[in-house]
Amino acid sequence: ETNRETKRLFIPANISQAGMIELLSHNKGVGIIIESEIDTLVNANKQDWGNYSDIIRNAFENESYSNYRSGTGKLTEIEQVKLSMALSGTGIQFKNLMVSPENGLFSRGCYYAFESNDTVLKSFGRMKTDMDIDASFESFATIASTYYKAAIALEKIQVNFSAEQMTNVQEALQVVFDKINEKGEKEFEANVKRAFSMVLKIATTLSFLEHCDDNGLTEEFNCTDKAIAIAMVLVLIFLMHGSKVYDTLSTNNSITLNSSQQRLYYILPEKFTKEEALEAAKDIGIKERTAYNAINGLEKKAWIILNADGTYVKQL
């Protein structure tokens, strides 16, 4: 066992603040929380013993965290909090967690909101597939373990970004930032500002995986343009969904998109005609009737607006 190897990776959301601090302290600040119900975290944070929202916020920039209890005289210091969290749940559960867009936690997350477009009732249960899911995950776990051991074997890994890459990210996010200002959504500005860090974090991870795949992992390497491009697409999608999630924290507007609406919205330019939208839908395999419904749905949900000249304009 190396001196950089962690002892416990997964941490339950149903945990006291003291328990969270203890586990992170013993694990060099590292931990992952995965819960299928947001309420698990909500219920913990409602308790005096369970509110660890400040620790989650510290984790975004891997800040340090310190805690002192006079009763025990115990001082705990975590040099860097490296906590990742993935939650799923309903819109109501999310509102119970965030309450307001001014919540500092809100701007530190990546969001994806969707609704089912099933027309046939389907029972809950494990997905039917010929794939051996357990074997697939076991194979993935082996690969992940190999990459992890390769990483901790190095003293430090540094990923470099070129000036051109940084400028491209800045310019892409500036477009979104300008639109947020035009809409007067001041509280959402923090999400766009922090999106710069999100792009770099995702691109760093993707570059790391790419170098592991090529057996070329070294202590220092340059981020690939491919990794930056993929990270930028992902973050723009997260911002698009995050903007609509932001609206729900103060309004009752419908925010979710079905799969056809989402696919069509993503490929459309900032300004387009209905004919252009239908042609674009045809190119990605969406039938004409479905495309008409998707356009109408996007307009009703205020993801696009119709101008007097007959053109549509995206709202983010």
Image (cartoon, rainbow, N blue to C red):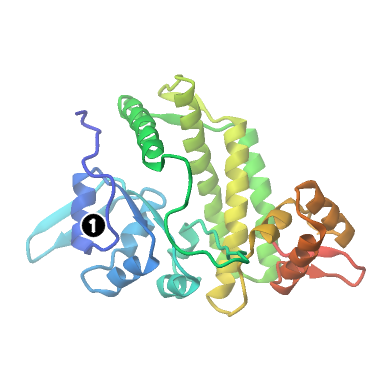
- Left or right for 140, reference 233: left
Residue 72 location (% of width, % of height):
7, 62
Q: Identify the residue position indicated by label 1 in the image.
A: 20
Q: Quadrant of the N terminus?
A: top left
| Relative image position of residue 58 (x, y in whole percent) | 36, 55
Tell me what residue is drawn at x 30 percent, y 72 percent: 43
Q: Quadrant of residue 105?
A: bottom left
- Secondary structure type for disc 1: helix
- Res 70 visible: yes
Above-or-below relation of 259 to 231: below
* Residue 273 seen in render: no
* Residue drawn at 62 percent across, 59 percent down: 240
Does 188 sit above or below residue 59?
A: below
Q: Is residue 208 left or right of residue 11?
A: right
Extreme residue in the right direction: 309
Q: Amino acid type of disc 1? A: Met
Q: Front-most of 156 and 296?
A: 296
Tell me the residue at 25%/74% (across/down). 47
The x and y percentages for residue 122 are 52, 64
In front: 198, or 237? 237
Location of residue 273 in the rendering, given as x and y in whole percent from the top left corner: 87, 60
The C terminus - image quarter: bottom right
Circle 1 Cα neighbour tier, 10 Å, few/some/many (<14 / 14–19 / ≥20)? many
Residue found farthest to the left: 72
Location of residue 304 with respect to 56 vertically, above or below: below
> Exactly how many numbered labels are in the figure?
1
Which corner quadrant of the image does residue 104 belong to? bottom left
